[in-house]
Amino acid sequence: MLVETVKLSAIVMRLTPELYPFLKRAELEFEIVLRNGLEALEAEDAMEIIQYSISEQQKDALLH
């Protein structure tokens, strides 16, 4: 099994580049571990990873 660690920005640029401008720098720098590597991802996988990454970044955010 190929395990690969990539930044979210690599996933976004490969599968959903239209979303790149809408993500924060911290979200784009989030490291993702892929079980079968970047080559095995599809667009719906990317969307799920993006949603998860955003929610993880917002976990510790303070609301005013």
Image (cartoon, rainbow, N blue to C red):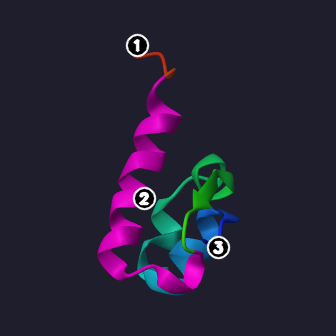
Q: Is residue 49 above or below residue 43?
A: above
Check residue 2 in the rendering and tell me which mark sits there, or answer none. 3
| Label whose residue precedes the other's in the sequence (3 or 2) | 3
Residue 55, located in which quarter of the rendered image?
Answer: top left
Percent of width and height locating residue 59: 46, 26
- Cα–Cα gap, marks 3 and 2: 18 Å
Residue 28's x, y, as percent? 62, 58
Q: Badges 3 and 2: C-beta atoms under 8 Å apart?
A: no
Q: Nearer the viewer, mark 1 or mark 3?
A: 3
Q: Amino acid at mark 3?
A: Leu
* Badge 2: residue crowd in 10 Å (few <14, some 14–19, many ≥20): some
Amino acid at circle 1: His
Residue beneath the point at 42% across and 58% down: 49
Queried whether the magenta region covers residue 55, the answer comes back as yes
Residue 1 horizontal side relative to residue 43, left or right: right
State whether the magenta stretch is mostly helix, strand or loop.
helix
Earlier along the polypeptide chain: callout 1 or callout 2? Answer: 2
Q: Which residue is mark 2?
A: 49
> What secondary structure is found at the residue carrying circle 3?
loop
Kind of residue at disc 2: Ile
Give the crowd class for mark 3: few <14, some 14-19, many >=20 residues within 10 Å: few
Q: Nearer the viewer, mark 1 or mark 2?
A: 2
Which residue is identified by label 1? 64
Magenta region includes residue 7: no
Label 1: which secondary element? loop
- Give me the residue at 40% from left, 13% from top: 64
Residue at (52, 37) in percent of width and height: 57
**Quarter of the image containing the N terminus?**
bottom right
